[in-house]
Image (cartoon, grey):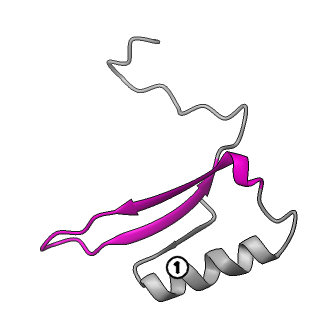
Amino acid sequence: MVFETQDVSEWRTQVRRLRAERNQIDWSMARMDTLCGRLVHPTTYRLSVFVPGSAPAPTKGNPGN
């Protein structure tokens, strides 16, 4: 994960800054998520980048085990 916040103005500012800085992020590998909030959980904005060669750790009950 590159950046995460619950403040939409901070989110927009950070994404603009990262886009302006050339070669900071490979945008073809980037993922922008908005995790919608409800009564208990606030809305969260997240920027993450796929990292080739990384795989999640196997978990019990996973068909790959």
Disc 1: which residue = 11
Tell me residue 15's x, y (percent). Answer: 63, 74
User: Magenta segment, which residues?
Assistant: 26-49
Which quadrant: the C terminus? top left
Tell me residue 48's x, y (percent). Answer: 59, 56
Which quadrant: the N terminus? bottom right
Which residue is rendered at x = 72% and y = 81% of the image?
A: 17
Which residue is rendered at x = 48% and y = 25% of the image?
A: 58
**For residue 47, what is the image quadrant?**
bottom right
Could you say which is closer to the camera, residue 40 or residue 19?
19
Which residue is rendered at x = 77% and y = 53% of the image?
A: 26
Q: In the shown orientation, is residue 22 left or right of residue 9? A: right
The amino acid beneath tag 1 is: Trp
Q: Residue furthest left?
A: 39
Q: In the shown orientation, is residue 4 left or right of residue 15? A: left
Which residue is rendered at x = 41% and y = 27% of the image?
A: 59
Tell me residue 7's x, y (percent). Answer: 42, 85
Secondary structure under tag 1 reads: helix
